Image (cartoon, rainbow, N blue to C red):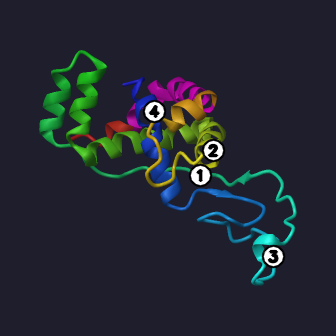
């Protein structure tokens, strides 16, 4: 399941941003601006489109925030039976994918643990890149994060992989 971090990062990034993480442009033109965004705006006029616009400067990102672990058993006994019959990563992923509450619990708890062990900065950089490149927008190309944010994805996955063994107890709580 060590490769699972790579397979699920885009999906989890979507959930993180949908729950409040995001990017604040200095000009304030985003879907989820932070409450402290001081955004210069043009006065409302009928010819606002032709008015000169000041350079808004670089994008800034806010933290995607740490995941909160899921408590309690989320995985069915059928999922456990399926996983026990697996010898390959693809089989494990198929078993988890067939039980969405289990899948969510395993990866949420894995990420929460990894973030608490020092991977928060790597995760934030990855989510920031995805947001800045439009990868989290509704209808975005699913390959966007792997093409536009490959280096950030690699850093986040390397960090998560380094904590995988230590974080096993965190996702073991998902199983009966």
Range of the magenta residues? 152-170
Which label sits on residue 75?
A: none
**Is 122 drawn above or below residue 20 in the view shown?**
above
Q: Viewer-nearest of labels 1 and 3?
A: 3
**Is 10 drawn above or below residue 147 in the view shown?**
below
The answer to whether residue 11 is visible is: yes
**Which residue is pictured at 45% across the width and 24% down the height?**
165
Dots 2, 3 in contact, CB < 8 A: no
Occupied quadrant, residue 121:
top right
Q: Is residue 24 left or right of residue 139?
A: right
Name the element at disc 4.
Answer: helix
The answer to whether residue 39 is visible is: no
Which label sits on residue 64?
A: 1
Residues at marks 2 and 1, CA–CA distance in whole angstroms: 5 Å
The residue beneath circle 2 is: 124
Q: Residues within 10 Å of mark 4 (few under 14, many from 20)?
A: many
Residue 75: image x %, image y %? 22, 43
Residue 149: image x %, image y %? 60, 34
Residue 159: image x %, image y %? 58, 28
The residue beneath circle 3 is: 42
């Amino acid at each position: 399941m060590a490769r699972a971090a790579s397979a699920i990062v885009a999906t989890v990034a979507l959930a993180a941003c949908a729950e409040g993480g995001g990017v604040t442009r200095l000009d304030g033109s985003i879907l989820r601006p932070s409450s402290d965004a001081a955004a210069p705006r043009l006065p409302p006029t009928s010819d606002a489109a032709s008015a000169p616009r000041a350079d808004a400067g670089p994008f800034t990102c806010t933290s995607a925030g740490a995941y909160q672990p899921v408590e309690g058993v989320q995985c069915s006994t059928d999922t456990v039976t399926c996983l026990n019959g697996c010898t390959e990563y693809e089989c494990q992923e198929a078993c988890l994918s067939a039980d969405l509450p289990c899948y969510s619990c395993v990866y949420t708890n894995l990420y929460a643990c990894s973030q608490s062990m020092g991977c928060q900065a790597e995760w934030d950089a990855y989510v920031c890149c995805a947001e800045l490149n439009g990868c989290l927008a509704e209808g975005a190309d699913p390959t966007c994060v792997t093409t536009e944010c490959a280096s950030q994805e690699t850093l986040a996955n390397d960090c998560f992989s380094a904590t995988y063994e230590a974080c096993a107890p965190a996702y073991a709580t998902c199983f009966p």
